[in-house]
Amino acid sequence: MTTGMRRPTAATIGAPIFRPVDAQYDFGHLLSLAHQIFITDLRHHLEQKGYGDLGLSHGYVLRMLVSAPATVGELARTLDITPQGASLIARQMERNGYITIAPDARDGRARVLALAARGRAVVTEAHRFHQGFERQWARALGAEDVATVRRVLTELVTEHPRGAVIARWARPA
């Protein structure tokens, strides 16, 4: 059922929902809040560039397909969802022109997903946003502090037992 409500974007969010950030926030909560700020800004940027039809999980699919095509089954295992869920996402992304779906030449039951021209274009635009976001915060907070945040986050992902698994499908563009 459609309610007619639009999802919030950086331009439409009003007063802060959370109390001002202070030392009371847990580390994980701060990571989550920072991620949400990034994702909200990225989605708003992409919407302004004509990619407002991307769903929340589509970015993960695009990142996974940047360096190589994958089957629907691989997508399901990577995103830890059912094959039916992965197939639904793939069909929606194909309808919107972001990916292609073709039979697997080696396994007639499998379907191979690959980036279409629109998918490659949105990945390029998202990469531009990523670079600009980092530059924006380097100007606001100082390049040294942002470099420290980058180093610490890289170490966190590198040292965590699941970091390699997650980094495998979240390939840089």
Image: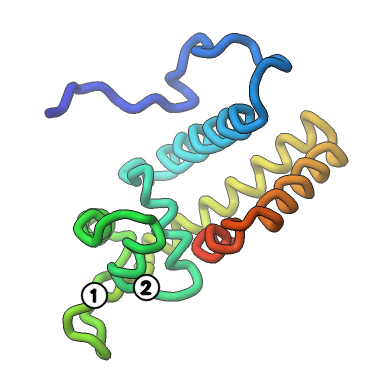
Per the image, label 1 sits on a secondary structure element best described as strand
Residue where numbered disc 2 is placed: 70
The kind of residue tagged 1 is Arg
The answer to which of 159 and 121 lies nearer the viewer is 159
Residue found 56% across the figure and 33% down from its top = 32
The answer to which of 133 and 37 lies nearer the viewer is 37
Residue 87 vertical position relative to residue 149 in the rendered view, above or below: below
Residue found 43% across the figure and 54% down from its top = 60
The answer to which of 76 and 46 lies nearer the viewer is 76
Residue 96 percent coordinates (x, y): 26, 54
For residue 170, side relative to residue 117 (left or right): right
Q: Quadrant of residue 110?
A: bottom left
Q: Residues within 10 Å of mark 1 (few under 14, many from 20)?
A: some
Label 1 – label 2 distance at C-alpha: 8 Å
Per the image, label 2 sits on a secondary structure element best described as strand
Residue 5 percent coordinates (x, y): 25, 22
Residue where numbered disc 1 is placed: 111
The kind of residue tagged 2 is Ala
Residue found 34% across the figure and 27% down from its top = 7
Q: In which quarter of the image is residue 9?
A: top left
**Mark number for residue 9?**
none
**Is mark 1 in CB contact (under 8 Å) with mark 2?**
no
Question: Which of pointers 1 and 2 lies earlier in the amino acid sequence?
Answer: 2
Here the colouring is rainbow
| In the image, farthest residue toward the left | 1
| In the image, farthest residue toward the bottom | 106
Location of the C terminus (image quadrant): bottom right
| In the image, farthest residue toward the front | 161
Residue found 33% across the figure and 60% down from its top = 98
Residue 44 vertical position relative to residue 104 in the rendered view, above or below: above
